[in-house]
Amino acid sequence: MPASPVNSVIPVPTPTPEKAVMPFMDPAFAVSVCRYDLSRGPLKFSVPISQAYTSVSFYTRTDVAYYAINDRAAGRRVIELDLMTAAQRAELPENEDITAADRLIVASPTTTGLIMIRALVPETGWLQAARNALAAAQCRPQ
Amino acid sequence: MRLLFGTVFALAIAAAIGLGATWIALTRGTAYGGVTIGAWTAWPKNGTPGIDPYARAMVARTGELPVGSGDGVAFFARTDDAGQPLDGRCDVLLSGITPQARFWTLTLYDPEGRLVANLVQRQGFTSQEIIRKADGSFDVTVGPRARPGNWLPTGGVEKYLLALRLYDTPIGMATRTGRDAPMPSIVKRACL
């Protein structure tokens, strides 16, 4: 993957026979990525779910998939979560009145990594709606 | 002196065999840790931190990102049910049903993971686009020439592989047999 700015959502071009960012990309999806760096603190991530199917996948610095969630598992109209290292999670104040059920926290094994957001395009007419949902994704420091 | 030469020679052969075997494992792929149903194989562990070292090396080599376990499972077929490599100059019939999933996609790639150009610019099907029979099963003809019904063009390439990806599915590492995961049959028909 070419170098891209950190802690922001970047759309990835749909693969074509002539050009693809990675091999074996599924052409039926609109894809955006957020290359993340937690060295300055945790990140807040959110993406509105698209009409058909939306998933968010997390990869370590060495491209190991460590977590993935889809719109049904999230159970809401927006997939939102906090991404932090294990060390940052341990530093969270304990007296915060937020239960685990209210707030999804994803612990990244590495300080940097990649979030891949995918919205299925079941038929070509749905492409723009999928891209619009991805364009509203946010990935930034808290 | 002879002992020294003999030892060096033996070590050189051992290194060649070891490195050669590793290279073959990385380029051809191993079914180790895979779930094989008919001509289809998936490696559900690749989408988790439990990915084994050979799979990690293969994934690093191709540069692909494995489907995360909470997202879905990807099955790959490089041969038909009889074990013959998939040849884009022949008609291949995919027939049957897929395991339970909210959505699935079927995509055709060349052996390096590139999409194949063709006249109708179709590289795959989603479960939504497929025309099904009354009982919910479907046929897809994968071949070089247009066919009625679901036709997935091969562009005439000599070798290709198919990826059937199931999204939001109970299929995973616990899947063992075709009863849990009925996959479409892959049968070669006429060749050009």
Image (tube, coloured by chain):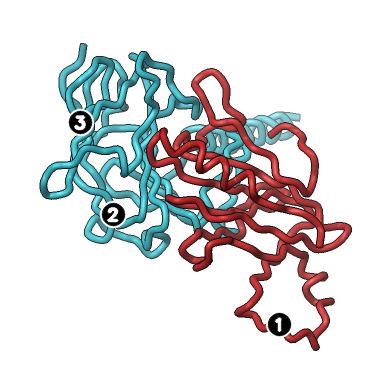
Q: Quadrant of residue B82?
A: top left
x and y, in percent, of residue B61 in the image: 61, 35
State the red chain: A
Query: Does label 1 lie on the same chain as label 3?
Result: no
Residue in the picture at 22% in, 59% down: B179
Nearer the observer, B178 or A130: A130
Tell me the distance, in whole angstroms, between the alpha carbons under discs 3 and 2: 18 Å
The quarter in which the C terminus of chain B is drawn is: top left
Circles 2 and 1, Cβ within 8 Å, touching? The answer is no
Q: Mark 3 belongs to which amino acid?
A: Leu
State the cyan chain: B
Q: Is residue B142 left or right of residue B155?
A: left
Q: Is residue A17 left or right of residue A92?
A: left
Residue in the picture at 38% in, 65% down: B174
Q: Mark 1 belongs to which amino acid?
A: Ile
Identify whether B8 is placed above or below A59: above
Which residue does the numbered mark 1 point to in the structure image? A98
Tell me the distance, in whole angstroms, between the alpha carbons under discs 3 and 1: 54 Å
SS class, disc 3: strand
Q: Residue furthest right?
A: A40
x and y, in percent, of residue A53 in the image: 45, 52
x and y, in percent, of residue B175 in the image: 34, 61
x and y, in percent, of residue B146 in the image: 23, 17
Which residue does the numbered mark 2 point to in the structure image? B99
What number is the disc on residue B93?
A: 3
Residue B54, can we see it?
Answer: no
